[in-house]
Image: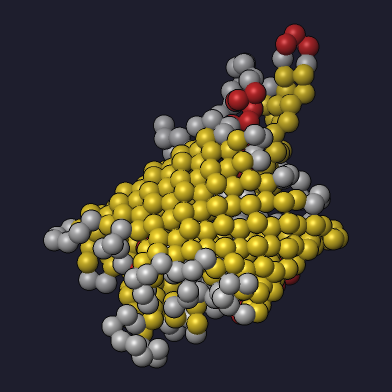
Amino acid sequence: MINVRGADRTPLPVVMRASGLESRARLTAAAFGRAERRLQALPAADGARVSYMPMDSGRAEVTASINERPLAPHGWWTAAAMGARALIDRETRLEFANMLRAGDLTFAGWRWSMARPRVEVGIALPSPGRLPGIVSFDAAWERQSYASVATSDSNMTDRESRRRAGLHLEDWATDWLRWQVGAALDRFGDRDYASADAALDLRLLHDHIAIASSAAWWRPSHTGDDLATASLSVGWRSTDDQTHTSLSSRLTFATATIASPRALWPGAGTGRGRDLLLRAHPLLHDDVMDGDAFGRTVSHGSMELTRPLARIPGGAVAMAAFVDSARVWHRTAAAVTSPLYLDVGVGVRLRAPGQRNVVRIDLAHGLLGGGFTLSAGWTRAWFR
């Protein structure tokens, strides 16, 4: 028997198909774990939990509890988070769940920075027909500003635009392995490309260890060099219980080929411009990308100790201490390898109700280069 709770707007067949469980089928530990992974990935769900109760005659009653996203953003917590993002990053993102009543999530984003504007739209929904997992479509236009490499004048910048439309398919093959494949049409400046990408994520030792790898390849429509990127991340955490003190660490190596435009280069900073954190070394200055840890190849490591302080309705407040490090090869300003940057700091973590991401406020100091830097941003859920 399979029961579903909390799916008020998501059709029951959508939830059942997403779980991969069937009545009168054998319930194994692998199938049970995969069902929870797939339901947690349901676009219209903010979270999910699967439990079971043994019954007579070798039967089991399975209960899938879904925490649905609201149809549209609402509530003062959401408004506060959107307002903070508008002030810090000068961007906003709106998400609408179950507009098609198919477990879908539609989103639209806008960044109004003069130096790096961006517009994006997209939709993700459980795959129709015989396709597995989640299918998603996204389209975006953006323009980035970079410190000029043609002159030593620090006031000169290079501007590069990008347009992209992509289609992706992802699924949990098992309770510990997730895959993703995709294809897109890309335009960097005045050059058109067709691209393909793939990713594999592993969760080991009851989610204490995570390994994420990805690769992408771009083929020009006319003459020109192929482009490629690759990355590998390995992470560890002591516990996934947010009510206990936790220690986590992450190592990342990311690279792009020599012909790749700077839009594909990795980097580390305060979380603006690129996701990797080197919190005493901002990557953006007046929204122009000219940070020390920006180049074609980046090696990065980070460790954080988090201790809960108090609980609030639907969320929690915690203190954190962290260490960030990075080294860069083939930087914008020089062909030589950068020194090893090392930053330490403390911060506050705020998990708001109904939000997967964690709001962070950090004060960092560079032990090897960099001064004191105060930054704010959002920390994504574990390896997402």
Image coordinates of residue 8 in percent, x first then y, are: 67, 45
Kindly identify the residue that appears in the image at 51 percent across and 49 percent down.
233
Query: Along the line of sight, which residue is nearer the eye, 38 or 130?
Result: 38
Give the side of residue 181 with respect to residue 99, left or right.
left
Query: Along the line of sight, which residue is nearer the eye, 221 or 206?
Result: 206
Query: Along the line of sight, which residue is nearer the eye, 242 or 133?
Result: 242
Give the side of residue 236 with respect to residue 319, left or right.
left
Among the 4 quarters of the image, the one containing residue 141: bottom left
Image coordinates of residue 217 in percent, x first then y, are: 30, 51
Count of numbered circles in the view: 0
Q: Quadrant of the image for the N terminus?
A: top right
User: Is residue 279 something that shows in the picture?
Assistant: no
Kindly identify the residue that appears in the image at 64 percent across and 34 percent down.
205
Image coordinates of residue 363 in percent, x first then y, are: 69, 74
Task: In the rendered view, tell whether residue 245 sits above or below residue 78.
Answer: above
Say how the picture is coloured.
secondary structure
Kindly identify the residue that appears in the image at 22 percent across and 71 percent down.
190
Image coordinates of residue 295 in percent, x first then y, are: 40, 67
Query: Along the line of sight, which residue is nearer the eye, 76 or 146?
Result: 146
User: Is residue 334 something that shows in the picture?
Assistant: yes
Task: In the rendered view, tell whether residue 354 sits above or below residue 30.
Answer: below
Which residue sits furthest left?
Answer: 223
Which residue sits furthest right?
Answer: 310
Among the 4 quarters of the image, the one containing residue 345: bottom right
Which residue sits furthest top?
Answer: 57
